[in-house]
Every structure is written in structure tokens, then in C-alpha cells.
Amino acid sequence: MKLRQTGHTSIEYVVVSAALAFALFVPIGGDAASPDSARTTLQIVLDEFAKGYRKISHAISLPN
């Protein structure tokens, strides 16, 4: 006898998506880089990407 299970995947997607959204968009207090205001994980990651891009573009612009 074969049992069919349907609908479980969509519930898992909702749970994982909610956990990811919570992790990315909830402000983190006590951040050493910005002690005056709380930043979200997404803001921290984007700031680090921007810093890395500035460093790379500066290194590329240097003469040989």
C-alpha cells in the first residue's frame, strides 16, 4: 500500500523562509561598528561587500 504525502514541502519552505527573513532583518544591538544604532545582518553584509569592492577597485586602479 502506497501512501501519498502532499503539502509538506510548502510548509518547510515557509518555515525556512521565515527563519531566514528573521535572521536577516532583525536588528542586532551592541554592534562594535555602529554603537549608536542597531544594524541588521543584511546591512552588515552589504557594508562589508562595499568595503571589499572599494579595496579591490583601488588595487586595480594602481599602476603596474
Image (cartoon, rainbow, N blue to C red):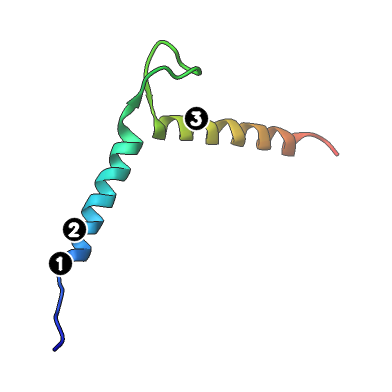
Identify the residue at horizontal 67%, vertical 37% (top origin). 56
Determine the residue positioned at 61% across, 35% down. Answer: 52
Q: CA distance from mark 2 to mark 1?
A: 7 Å
Question: Which amino acid, by three-letter code, is at mark 3?
Answer: Asp
Q: Which residue is mark 2?
A: 11
| Quadrant in the rendering for residue 9 | bottom left
42 left or right, relative to 26: right
Q: Which residue is mark 3?
A: 47
The residue beneath circle 1 is 7
Marks 1 and 3, the one that precedes in the sequence: 1
Q: Residue at x 50, y 18 (%)?
A: 33
Q: Is residue 58 left or right of residue 25?
A: right
The secondary structure type at the circle numbered 1 is loop
Q: Is residue 50 above or below residue 31?
A: below
Q: Splitting the image into 4 quarters, where does residue 59 fall?
A: top right
Against 31, residue 20 (above or below) is below
- Where residue 55 sits in the image (x, y, percent)? 66, 32
The residue sitting at the right extreme is: 64
Mark 3 neighbour density, 10 Å: few (under 14) some (14–19) many (20 or more): few
Q: Amino acid at mark 1?
A: Gly
Q: Is residue 15 above or below residue 23?
A: below
Q: Residue at x 60, y 36 (%)?
A: 53
